[in-house]
Image (cartoon, grey):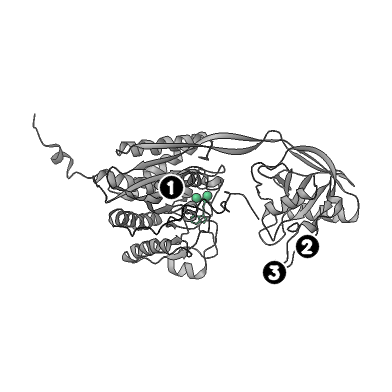
Amino acid sequence: MLALPLVALAGPVRPAVADTVATMERHLDALQTIADQNNGNRAAGSSGYRASVDYAAKVLEKAGYDVTRQRFEITTYRLTERPAVAVVRPEKQRLRERKDYLVANFSGSASLQRPVVPAGGTRVPPPADGKGLKSGCSADDFPAETRGAIALVQRGGCMLTQKFENAQRAGARAMLLFNSGLPGEKEVVTITAENGNTLPIVFLSYRAGRDLLRSAEARRTVVRLDIRGKVLTKPTWNLIADSRGGDPERTLVVGGHLDSVPDGPGINDNGSGIALVLVAAQQMAERGEKPRNRVRFALWAAEEMGLLGSVHYVTTLPKHERQRIFAYLNFDMVASPNYVRFVDETLANPASVAIGDDFRAAFKRKGLVSAHFDSGGRTDTFAFIEAGIPAAGLFSGAEGEKTKSQQKRYGGRAGEPYDACYHQPCDTIDNINRRALREFSSAALTVVGEMARRKPAVPEATAARTLSSSPRYKGPYALY
Ligand code: DTR
Ligand code: ZN
Ligand code: ZN
């Protein structure tokens, strides 16, 4: 037998993960398969999420990392019976779930039949400029008859929680909230109350709300509600893997969220960011690189439920651990079909903008333009920024529409969403833009590498403060 060296047989040894995009595509395929085998989604609390955690943990362990699963509990809401909403007076009429109404997430449960009392400030039709809609935003919007009745309120002008609180203070037994009637705000959407809410809350289409308002203004109108829901507590996990070398006093966190929404497989949102974090970890391990700074790869749970995983991580970090983190890099959606190269940074935080500058420079070196974006609490940079840790990220666009000038710079189609499948069942492997994968991963890996090696400026004494606010983003639920 000829004893040829293996290398000669196989040609030059190519590291298994050298082809960044091909490696990312393997991860995306794996996540798609997981969704296919688990009711089409990978939402926190589901079997698809558990399988996603197992998959990512295996990839990281195989690359040689010690992987930590950080367990915490999440609460979800589920209707336990089919709800019913019906007008019983002046004329009987059953409303249709999904077409005319949707029960709010975390709605209180009740079976009741009560008169409908419109709150002040309703505008039907709504003002053309959309201004001045603030029904239920003030306590005086609720007349005395609201006590013991069902309050009817129009969407617009303030956070929904404010409307719920005002209605409850006025003694309402339930609330019907109808869509504003403005363009794009006519159909039903899922809204959310806070966990712990006891007020039964139903969202109505503009049409259903308008009809009910007309009726209630003209004569005694009575509605019957039957809502039974329950809050479930379930465990979920963040995944954390630290580089072998690197000074722990200077830790760089690189992450993205691992969960999808319940409505789809979440391959662009956020399989793409996860594929990027995984390939960064694999390549660092494969090069046998001992970075100057410790690099911590973090895969967050339950971003789609209100940034829960990253908020849990940051708020439970001991103070000295938090002070070791000099930056957080976030990757949430990096392969949108009709993409823009957004650099997500917080303008109010100069250190966040400095990271943004690094991303911009990395794109520029490849001859690629990019655009500033401020996610303003809509992704996992939120908890870090709030805790005084500089954070920034890359983002290829979600439900927003591409402008004409963006089309000139980035190609694609103006007037269409960056990701037409955002939060939908069609966010599959076919919803991935390969060119975006290549461009975003190139810039991301460059910046991760630089920041892992560079001696970071000593972070300014970050006051040990806890989160000053709770995230505005509550996943795919309307909040105002
Ligand atoms: N948080 C995202 C979508 C999203 C919206 N704005 C930004 C800005 C930067 C990153 C992501 C996003 C989601 O998971 O739905
Ligand atoms: Zn999302
Ligand atoms: Zn996302």
Confirm if mark 3 falls within 8 A of ligand 1.
Answer: no
In the structure shown, which secondary structural element does the residue marked by tag 2 occupy? loop
Amino acid type of the residue tagged 2 in the rendering: Arg
As drawn, 359 above or below 45: below
Whichever of labels 2 and 1 marks the residue nearer the N terminus, that label is 2
Residue of label 1: 319
Mark 1: C-beta under 8 Å from nearest atom of ligand 1: no
* Up-down relation of residue 398 to residue 64 (above or below): below
Confirm if mark 2 falls within 8 A of ligand 1. no
| Amino acid beneath label 3 | Asp
On-image quarter of the C terminus: bottom right
Please give the count of numbered marks on the rendered protein: 3
Q: Residue at x 9, y 32 (%)?
A: 3
**Between marks 3 and 2, how big is the CA–CA gap?**
12 Å
Disc 1 residue crowd, few under 14, some 14–19, many 20+, Cα 10 Å: some
Q: Is 422 on the left or on the right of 147, as rendered?
A: left
Query: Which of the labelled discs sits on residue 38, or is there none?
Result: none
| Residue 446, position as x, y percentages in the image | 31, 57
Q: Which residue position is annotated with label 2?
A: 123
From the top left corner, tell me how far across and down residue 434 is, in percent.
39, 53
Q: Nearer the viewer, residue 369 or 428?
A: 369
Decide: marks 2, 1 in contact (CB < 8 A)? Answer: no
Which residue position holds label 3? 129
Q: Is residue 256 left or right of residue 125?
A: left
Left-right relation of 304 to 4: right
Q: CA distance from mark 1 to mark 3?
A: 48 Å
